[in-house]
């Protein structure tokens, strides 16, 4: 089966062609450069970008795969969660193609697609497993019995982990997006432990997350060192690069320690020996180091990551998951619409 995937949930316009879980083409056009000056994604700008470039990205993906629309057997599209205007562009495109080509259409959950991206690797996981979704908008632990049988175990109660990275970068004047900037600065730190930030575990057996506290701790620490922050802090220019590096390192260690601890706690609770990670934050090298180290010490729990090409928003994960769901009998009609606030609990099929 040849599946066309469309992803427009936020600031990346993605179209992919996948055949039997093999990626034939994966084209992504990002509008992140347009959002930098604002310190975050501006929904209207993202939506207009999708409208302007979706046709071009679609044409590039088909050309890269050496195919035409007539070769497509199935169309998969992200229906949520995400920005309503952005989602609407992808869904409208998918519905138009489905109707005009008389091809089946299937809607895909963006968070679950991120976790399914690990299945695009040669070392694909098997069921059951504990999935940890970590991105700019989502942090959640999910237990999978099968791709369409899963249970939400825990999720963030405030900031997502990627959102916390962005806010810390903003405090330190590192710009947007914050994840790469904080990781790069942390690599320059000697990691001597002179700066430490709290880990929020929310109780011994809790599988929920909270990252607003560590972000606030960074804010107070910087304020105490440099006095009152001016304005939003985004234009704050701290010339002490060693200070910035140490703060980034301490923040990153605090956040990643919580992710590792809770993921392996979930595996112990569910008596599961596989953990699968997905989402933009999984591209972080220190995250991978810490999870692999914990895996070695766990006595048998294996960790699976997506290839770095599939960590950030992309349509390959959407097409692959849509193909798998279609094969299991899932269907949808042309009445689907964007679900920007789709909650994991609403999407669960226990």
Image (cartoon, helix red, strand yellow):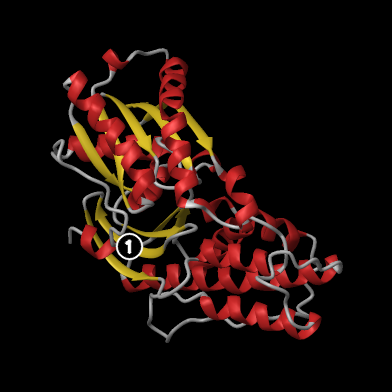
Q: Secondary structure at mark 1?
A: strand
Image spot of residue 143 (x, y percent): 30, 62
Q: Which residue is mark 1?
A: 142
Question: What residue appears at the point 51 percent right and 41 percent down from the top-left corner?
Answer: 307
Report crowding for label 1: few under 14, some 14 to 19, many 20 or more residues within 10 A (C-alpha): many
Q: Would residue 20 be visible to someone looking at this image?
A: no
Q: Quadrant of the C terminus?
A: bottom left
* Near-viewer residue (278 or 106): 106
Image spot of residue 106 (x, y percent): 22, 37
* Near-viewer residue (73 or 266): 73
Q: How many marks?
A: 1
Instruction: Report whether 264 appears left or right of 239.
Output: left
Q: Is residue 317 above or below residue 177?
A: above
Q: Quadrant of the N terminus?
A: top left
Image spot of residue 91 (x, y percent): 29, 38
Image spot of residue 236 (x, y percent): 76, 68
Question: What residue appears at the point 72 percent right and 68 percent down from the top-left corner?
Answer: 172
Q: Quadrant of residue 342?
A: bottom left
Instruction: Report whether 51 appears left or right of 226.
Output: left
Instruction: Report whether 344 appears left or right of 254.
Output: left
Q: Would residue 50 be visible to someone looking at this image?
A: yes
Q: Is residue 122 above or below residue 143?
A: above
Q: Quadrant of residue 14?
A: top left
Q: Quadrant of residue 57?
A: top left
Question: What residue appears at the point 38 percent right and 82 percent down from the top-left corner?
Answer: 205
Question: What residue appears at the point 38 percent right and 75 percent down from the top-left corner?
Answer: 207
């Amino acid at each position: 089966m040849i599946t066309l995937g469309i992803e427009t949930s936020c600031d990346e316009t993605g179209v992919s062609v996948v055949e039997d879980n093999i990626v034939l083409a994966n084209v992504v056009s990002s509008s992140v450069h347009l959002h930098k000056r604002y310190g975050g994604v501006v929904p209207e700008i993202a939506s207009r970008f999708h409208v302007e470039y979706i046709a071009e990205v679609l044409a590039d993906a088909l050309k890269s795969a050496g195919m035409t629309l007539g070769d497509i057997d199935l169309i998969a599209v992200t229906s949520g969660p995400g920005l309503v205007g952005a989602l609407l562009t992808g869904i409208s495109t998918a519905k138009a193609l489905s109707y005009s080509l008389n091809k089946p259409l299937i809607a895909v959950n963006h968070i679950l697609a991120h976790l399914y991206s690990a299945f695009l690797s040669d070392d694909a996981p098997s069921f059951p497993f504990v999935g940890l979704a970590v991105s700019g908008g989502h942090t959640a632990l999910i237990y999978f019995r099968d791709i369409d049988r899963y249970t939400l175990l825990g999720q963030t109660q405030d900031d997502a982990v990627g959102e916390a990275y962005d806010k810390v970068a903003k405090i330190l004047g590192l710009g947007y997006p914050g994840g790469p900037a904080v990781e790069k600065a942390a690599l320059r730190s000697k990691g001597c432990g002179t700066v430490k930030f709290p880990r929020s575990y929310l109780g011994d057996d809790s599988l929920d997350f909270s990252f607003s506290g560590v972000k606030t701790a960074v804010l107070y620490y910087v304020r105490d060192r440099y006095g009152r922050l001016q304005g939003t802090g985004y234009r704050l220019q701290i010339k002490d690069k060693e200070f910035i590096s140490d703060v980034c390192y301490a923040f990153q260690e605090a956040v990643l320690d919580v992710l590792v601890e809770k993921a392996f706690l979930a595996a112990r609770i569910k008596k599961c020996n596989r953990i699968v990670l997905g989402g933009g934050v999984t591209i972080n090298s220190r995250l991978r180091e810490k999870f692999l180290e914990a895996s070695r010490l766990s006595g048998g729990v294996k960790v699976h990551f997506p290839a770095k090409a599939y960590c950030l928003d992309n349509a390959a994960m959407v097409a692959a998951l849509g193909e798998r769901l279609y094969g299991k009998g899932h269907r949808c009609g042309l009445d689907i619409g964007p679900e920007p606030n789709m909650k994991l609990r609403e999407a669960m099929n226990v």
